[in-house]
Image (tube, rainbow, N blue to C red):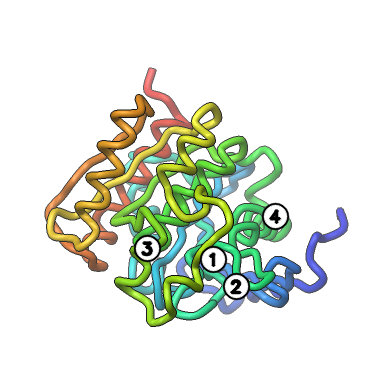
């Protein structure tokens, strides 16, 4: 067995796992400590399964996409209905900095590299159904949408598809949700504060890119502006609006759009 990237790894005992959910905890220099990942693995004899990383919003952690968003239930249903091919879900914490890290860097902690580098590696090391050949996808909601769209653009060489739901599009919008001063989130490079800048800076390697937002969401105008800016810049993307606000009922429903979008990229219709 190859040497692990991580100093320590804890993996949940299969005897006590439920509904295909399991937990991985690894120690990584990027977090200067430990990070948690909730993983869902479909039933069956699979190999080289794609990995769909789902990033949570403010206040949440590794458990919330499953226990509030029913992500594994939606994914299993779509697989059973033949609408998507089997895949593994990786649902990490954001590093648990303040009300939310914005999946960015703070005080020597690299929450971005935790997501882009450590999470895929931890899943590959501990889940036999995936491998170095597994394709990577990334999505998220709200703050997690900001992380997914920005990191997906910056690391386009490794992601096959990128989506966001009800996404924060610029770091300034964090002040809507968190008590930490927005100055704490400032970054040296504009592409780490603004999804549009990240996309423009990495447009030549941008994966298929999709985002949506609810019509009554407090972030709707920011998402519309991102859509308009991308259109004006000639950047291919998909954008949709649906009924609903900034709430779990919306994300529970529209995660399916992300999974179908990813499947369309991975398994093109002939």
Which quarter of the rendering shows the N terminus?
bottom right
Tag 1 near tag 2, CB within 8 Å: yes
Q: Quadrant of residue 60?
A: bottom left
Which residue lies under the disc numbered 2?
36
Question: Pointer 3: residues within 10 angstroms few (<14), some, or many (20+)?
Answer: some
Q: Is residue 142 left or right of residue 248?
A: right
Q: Residue at x 26, y 67 (%)?
A: 248
Q: CA distance from mark 3 to mark 2?
A: 27 Å
Instruction: Choose the circle earlier in sequence order: 1 or 2.
Output: 2
Disc 1 to disc 4, C-alpha distance: 12 Å
Q: Position of residue 128 (x, y in %)?
A: 68, 53
Residue 120: horizontal and vertical position, in percent?
Answer: 64, 53
Residue at image position (55%, 60%) is: 187
Q: Outermost residue toward the top?
A: 270
Query: Which residue lies under the disc numbered 4?
Result: 121
Q: Secondary structure at mark 1?
A: strand
In the picture, measured across the screen, residue 106 lies left or right of residue 101, that is right
**113 vs 42, nearest the viewer:** 113
Q: Quadrant of residue 15?
A: bottom right
Secondary structure under the numbered disc 3 in the rendered image: helix
Q: In the rendered structure, which disc, 3 or 4, sits on the residue that comes first in sequence?
A: 4
Depth-wise, is mark 1 or mark 3 nearer the camera? Answer: 3
Q: What separation in Å lies between label 1 and label 3 (alpha carbons)?
A: 24 Å
Residue 259 on image: x %, y %? 38, 45
- Looking at the rendered structure, the secondary structure element under dot 4 is helix
Where is 35 relative to 76, above or below? below
Q: Label 2: state its secondary structure.
A: strand
Task: Give the labeled residue for mark 1.
Answer: 92
Q: Which mark is residue 172?
A: 3
Q: Nearer the viewer, residue 145 or 44?
A: 145
């Amino acid at each position: 067995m190859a040497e692990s990237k991580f100093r320590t790894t804890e993996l949940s005992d299969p005897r006590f796992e439920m509904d295909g959910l399991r937990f991985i905890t690894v120690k990584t220099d990027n977090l200067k400590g430990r990070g948690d990942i909730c993983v869902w693995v479909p039933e069956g004899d699979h190999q080289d399964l794609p990995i769909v990383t789902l990033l949570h919003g403010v206040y949440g952690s590794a458990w919330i996409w499953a226990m509030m968003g029913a992500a594994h239930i939606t994914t299993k249903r779509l697989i059973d209905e033949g609408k998507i091919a089997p895949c593994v879900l990786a649902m990490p914490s954001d590093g648990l900095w303040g009300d939310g890290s914005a999946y960015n860097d703070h005080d020597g902690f690299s929450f971005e590299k935790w997501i882009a580098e450590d999470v895929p590696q931890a899943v590959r090391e501990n889940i036999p159904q995936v491998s170095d050949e597994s394709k990577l996808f990334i999505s998220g909601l709200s703050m997690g949408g900001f992380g997914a769209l920005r990191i997906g653009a910056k690391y386009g060489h490794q992601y096959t598809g990128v989506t966001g739901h009800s996404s924060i599009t610029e770091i300034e919008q964090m002040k809507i949700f968190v008590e930490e001063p927005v100055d704490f989130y400032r970054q040296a490079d504009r592409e780490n504060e603004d999804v549009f800048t990240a996309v423009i800076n990495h447009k030549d390697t941008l994966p298929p890119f999709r985002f949506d937002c609810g019509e009554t969401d407090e972030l709707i105008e920011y998402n519309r502006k991102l859509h308009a800016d991308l259109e004006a810049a000639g950047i291919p993307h998909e954008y949709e609006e649906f009924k609903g606000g900034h709430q779990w009922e919306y994300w529970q429903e529209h995660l399916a759009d992300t999974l179908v979008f990813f499947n369309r990229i991975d398994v093109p219709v002939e």
